[in-house]
Each structure stands twice: as structure tokens, then as C-alpha cells.
Image: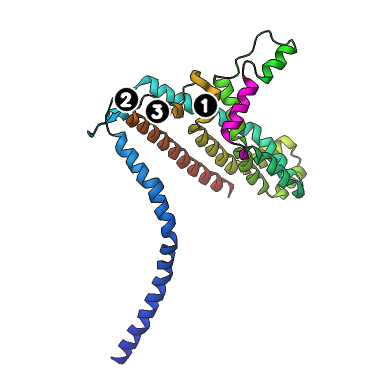
Amino acid sequence: MSSATASSSHARPAATASSSPRLTRWLALSPGLALIVGLMVVPLSSMLLISFRPESFGQILPEFTLANYIGLLTDPSRLALFGYTFGIAALVTLLCAVLGLPVAAMIARAPARWRGLLYFVVAAPLLVNTVVRSYGWLLILGRKGLLNTLLIEGGLIDSPLALSGNMIGLVIGATQVFLPFMILSLATSLLAIDRRLLESADVLGAGPVRAFMTVTLPLAVPGLIAGSVLVFSLMLGAFVTPLILGGTAVKYLSVAVYTDALVLFNLPRATALSLLLMVAVLFVYFVQKRLTRRAEEALT
């Protein structure tokens, strides 16, 4: 009897000691969890509820309907809007990858004492507001902007080129806005490559191009995937750059959400469109996770 009592008295403090760190962890996490619930879960739940409501002259009616989603997924103009937005985001992602890879390679090959400066030069545009950068490109690419003025005064063209208020201006401006994210992602992967692998490729007779295609590029795939997904998802949700540089000539999802919500006062349809965009972004991150896992398995 005494032995059983002693064993139970030993087990009770052990159970209390094991539960104490768990309680401490939950108490430490509770402010962050409360913030996430308050700023994400509650608003998203409200948006989901509104997206299933009908609208009449700017008023949200209490009935339940699927018309908002059915209209968005069956209307040819809305489907074209999705395709146009995804196409522009893919093009900007491709340009960022092509332009960012040489810069990232230069950072990876630079001496360690210069990398901090190079990182600052790449990340410096991120310190400037997107509105300012987009408006700066408008001043450069506009019909009376810097580029057209130089071309006309140089006698290269007779009339201004249409470089803004269309897809050309949007792609140029968006590529510059999101290029640092691609460069930083690629530079991280390139710096992780063991230099002995490149030296071995050189010893075995591989030229610079072949060494890049067979050693550098495969090992940089995780960074390329991460950077591409980051740029693609950010471009899908971009609003300022499409609005300023694309103008009314470019139909874009984020601009359509703004128009439905604040111009047409059709909040349920705008909410449904924004939730579909969020689902698309989540699907992109899911694909990125799968691709990254396969790339890591292939490398190992």
C-alpha cells in the first residue's frame, strides 16, 4: 500500500512537470494566435459569408446564393480576365528569372566583402514605395516621358511610342518592382552550391555553359522555384502597378475587385472574386511545395 502511494506521489509531480512547459508554450503563443484569429480568421469568415449573398443597388441582401461564383466561373469575359491576369503574371515571372539569374550569379561569385553592398543595391528599390516606383516609370515611359523625348530629339522616331497605359508599360514596371525578390531567392541557392562541384566540372573538361547547365542550374532550382512562386503570387495580387502603368487598357483581377467594390458597389461579387484569387495563390504555393520536394529528392 505504501509503495503504491509512493509511486503515485512520484507520478503526480512528473505529470505536473511535463504539462507545465506545454502550458507555458500555449500562454506564449496565445497573443500571436489571438492576433491571427482577429486579423485573418474573422475577416476571411466574414468575406466568405458575404460572397454568398446577393446584391441589389449596393445593398447586401440576407439570402443565400451561388450566383456570384457561378457568374465568375461561367462568364467568358471573367474567364478571359483570369487568363489575362495569369498570363501577365507568368510573363513577369519569366522576365524576372531571365534577368535575375545573371545578377544572382554575380553576387554569388563576388568576394564576401562586397556581397553586403551588392545585396543593398538589389534590395534598395524595396525601400521606395511601390506607388512612387510605378509613377516614376510612368514619367519615363509616358508619351511625353523621358524615353520618348530622347527618341524624338534624337531623330529616331517621329511620334511618341505607346509605352504606358498598356501591357508593355505594365510588364516593364512590374518586372522592375518584383525583380529583387527573384534575385535574392536565386542568390541564396547559388551561394549554397559547393564550389568544389564547379571545380570538378572544370577539371573534367566542362566549359562554362555546360557547367552552368549541368551543375549550377540544377542546384539553383529550389531558389528558382521559390523566387518564381513569390513573384508570381505577388504579381497576381498587384494593384498599384497595373492601375498606374496598365491603365484602362489592361484588364486585371485586382483592378476588377477594386471596380466591383468601390465603383459598382457590388461587394459580394468583389469578395467572391478576391476569394477565388486567394484560392489560386494558395494553389500556386501548393504546387511550389510539391516541386521543391521533387527537386530536393532529385538532388539527393
Residue 140 lies within the magenta run: yes
Would you call the spot at circle 2 few (<14 residues within 10 Å), some (14-19), or many (20 or more)?
Answer: few
> Which percent across, then down, holds residue 215?
67, 42
Q: How far apart are marks 2 and 3 (CA)?
A: 19 Å
Name the amino acid, label 1: Pro
Residue under label 1, please give it: 242
Frontmost residue, 298 versus 53:
53
Q: Which numbered disc, 1 or 2, marks the residue that appears first in the sequence? A: 2
Q: Residue at 42%, 22% (x, y): give it.
A: 80
Q: Residue at 68%, 7% (x, y): give it.
A: 158
> Which percent across, then down, holds residue 137?
62, 26
Residue under label 2, please give it: 71
Looking at the image, residue 124 sits to the left or right of residue 34; the answer is right
Q: Which numbered disc, 1 or 3, marks the residue that appears first in the sequence? A: 1
Disc ID at residue 220: none
Would you call the spot at circle 3 few (<14 residues within 10 Å), some (14-19), or many (20 or more)?
Answer: few
Q: Looking at the picture, does residue 59 appear above or below residue 220?
A: above
Name the amino acid, label 3: Leu
Name the amino acid, label 2: Gly
Q: How far apart are marks 1 and 2 (CA)?
A: 24 Å
Residue under label 3, please give it: 262
> Which percent across, then down, holds residue 243?
51, 25
Marks 2, 3: nearer the viewer: 3
Element class at badge 1: helix
Q: Which range of residues does the magenta coloring cover?
A: 126-143
